[in-house]
Amino acid sequence: MKIALLTDGIFPYVIGGMQKHSYYLAKYFAQKGIYVDLYHTNQSKLDIAKLELFSEEEKKFIRSFVIPFPKPGKLPGHYLKASYLYSSAVFETFKRQEPADFVYAKGFSAWRLIEEKKKGFKCAPVGVNFHGYEMFQKAPDFKSYLASKLLLQKPVLYNTKSADLVFSYGAKITDVIKQIGIPKERIIEIPTGIEESWLNSVTSEPGEKIKLLFVGRFERRKGVEELNKALASLNANNNFEFHFIGPIPESKKLKSSQIIYHGAITDASVMKQKVKSMDVLVCPSHSEGMPNVIMEAMASGLAVIATDVGAVSLMVDDTNGILIADSKPSSITNAINKILSLPAGSLVKMKQASVEKVRSQFLWEHIIQDTIQKISKHLV
């Protein structure tokens, strides 16, 4: 089988959750002997020709086509224009290659291909993956509504409805896809995964202070503002530390000896060790897909507090954390207080449950096999 994987980048050449997922797809397809025509771009200073995160054996199954991504302008809608131009450049390269058996497209990368296919261009089935469909989830404020929903909904609808198949992580994401008019038989449900090397076999009891963690950049939909209000309302005598990893602006940092800001951590090994030293991840997002940060925290042996958005409910339940209904500061405060009041043994059981859930449900070795089987059912 040969799969054409169209994406706007793979990790580490482009940073992001979609790009990391694209990297793992290419890697594990290759490990299973699936040939991959990889259409992607480079936004780093790394030599993309080396594909250094793939083994030599994996590279035997991967053909890399590097497409420059047009520089978006600053006005609203310019990113969409750049995305369409990128999809056109991808299509011009794609149409000159030997046909693939299936086209797996991330985001807008198949926009032009979908257009041409509707006009009569012959190619294999095209499946699109817009991950969380955040533009159809609840926006945290009016500005976010304008930036996300008004600009993105129409082109996402076009690509989703015009594709042959639509990928979903499941849970509330599938509900969204159905609500915008995609029948169940055109939806392929597959969760994201993580590498086995992330699994933490040792989940120790908390130390003198329970260590809570937020990982991410300051983005409105991530709920940092609500998290700050929740932290400010907590009793200063509570026996905890709260750690932020990510580029949080100085103006958004709280002044407290219990709150520690590490900034962005780019070294993967340092990041792994830092996460493993924590006890609880807090992810109070207003909208999400199936966040890598939660998957990595669970594999590292952390309990999780997270909002019930996207496919988060597939990962978090009362066995390994607390699923909160919304991102209100009071909801976050109540969840943190509940975690802080748990007996140490109960928190350890939550941490262990996170690791076991990842081991049994979310390792890429299993996810990729499920992906291949479900794609195979739709091949002509």
Image (cartoon, rainbow, N blue to C red):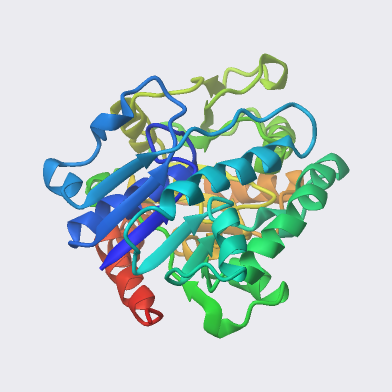
Residue 111 figure quarter: bottom right
Q: Is residue 179 above or below residue 282?
A: below
Q: How many marks?
A: 0
Q: Is residue 315 above or below residue 150?
A: below
Say left or right for 358 vs 147.
left
Q: Quadrant of the C terminus?
A: bottom left
Please report the residue visible at 71 percent of the width from the left and 49 percent of the height from the top: 327
Please report the residue visible at 56 percent of the width from the left and 71 percent of the height from the top: 120
Would you say residue 179 is visible in this rendering?
yes
Q: Quadrant of the N terminus?
A: bottom left
Would you say residue 302 is visible in this rendering?
no
User: Closest to the observer: 212 or 29?
Assistant: 29
Spot occupied by residue 229 in the image (x, y as percentages of width and height):
74, 34
Say left or right for 333 vs 213.
right
Please report the residue visible at 18 percent of the width from the left and 48 percent of the height from the top: 58
Q: Is residue 278 above or below residue 118?
A: above
Spot occupied by residue 109 in the image (x, y as percentages of width and height):
53, 50
Spot occupied by residue 199 in the image (x, y as percentages of width and height):
26, 49
